[in-house]
Amino acid sequence: MPEIPLVPAHWRFPARPASVRRARHAVTASLPQALRQRLGDDLGLLTSELVTNAVCHGTRRKAGELIELVLWPADGHYWLAVSDPGAGRPVLTRPDADSESGRGLLLVDTLATAWTVRPRPTRGTSVVAGLSLRRGG
């Protein structure tokens, strides 16, 4: 049986591009060893895409603005919530072949078993995505 943490893992990172790599590493390193091979790559990519979107579109990159991540197991999934202080809602688009951006949520939609966008109770937006523990093994 995999080692499941009793409380969710929680991180806050500055709203800067350098935080994408730090967040990806923190999230994948927090997975129980037995799940890293099965979920690590996909969870790392989800983290990179969601944190990049939060930094680029959910903040003004002002000093003190933070991106918040929460990772927890529940209902046969590992769930990742990435929150930012912005009021906008990410929208899934289908960019044409010449577009240089706009594919982040398309990757999230492809990788995640389920995902949604939720307003935060006080300020900001959270994107929540889940990966099934049954995938790839």
Image (cartoon, helix red, strand yellow):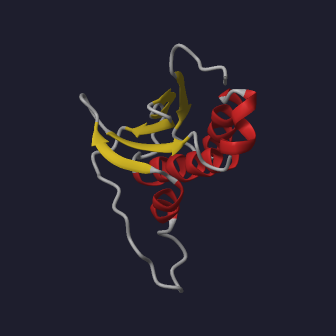
Residue 75, image x, y percentages? 44, 32
The relative height of residue 93 versus residue 120 in the rendered view (above or below) is: below
Residue 68, image x, y percentages? 47, 32
The relative height of residue 5 versus residue 114 in the rendered view (above or below) is: above
Count all numbered tags in the image, as a single digit: 0
Residue at x-position 69% and y-position 49%: 41
- The residue at the far top in this view is 6
Residue 90, image x, y percentages? 35, 56
Residue at x-position 63% and y-position 34%: 27
Out of 12 and 113, give the one closest to the viewer.
113
Residue at x-position 41% and y-position 49%: 114
Picture quarter with the N terminus: top right
Residue 37, image x, y percentages? 75, 42
Residue at x-position 47% and y-position 65%: 106
Out of 109 and 123, give the one closest to the viewer.
109
Left or right: residue 18 versus residue 65 is: right
